[in-house]
Image (tube, rainbow, N blue to C red):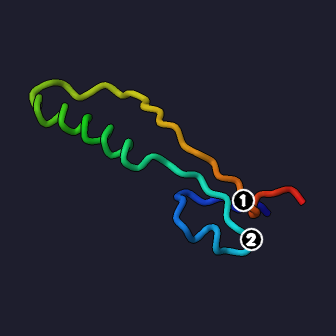
Amino acid sequence: MKVISFSNMSIPNLLNPSLTTITQPAEAIGQECAKILIKKLTKPRQPDLPNEVISLPSQLTIRESTLVR
């Protein structure tokens, strides 16, 4: 069994085996959410905002929990 976690706190390195993690850009996610919210709040009488996909890069940090042995 292989284990992967989201977030990249300092704890994954302390575990045995060390935990593979996916780091997401939390600040950039918050900024994009704020932009959408501000758009909606500043133009409340406009129709709903169209659905859109916003892709932000994540980073995979491979550690012992997913190594092939």
- Please name the residue that numbered disc 2 is placed on: 17
> Which quarter of the figure has residue 68?
bottom right
Picture quarter with the N terminus: bottom right
On the picture, is 30 further left or further right than 63?
A: left
Q: Tell me if residue 48 comes above or below residue 57 in the rendering.
A: above
Question: In the rendering, which numbered label is found on residue 44?
Answer: none
Q: Tell me if residue 12 comes above or below residue 32 in the rendering.
A: below
- Classify mark 2: helix, strand or loop: loop
> Which quarter of the figure has residue 46?
top left
- Classify mark 1: helix, strand or loop: loop
Q: Tell me if residue 32 comes above or below residue 9 in the rendering.
A: above
Picture quarter with the C terminus: bottom right
Q: Residue at x 25, y 35 (%)?
A: 35
Q: Residue at x 62, y 57 (%)?
A: 21
Q: Residue at x 26, y 35 (%)?
A: 36
Q: Residue at x 13, y 37 (%)?
A: 41
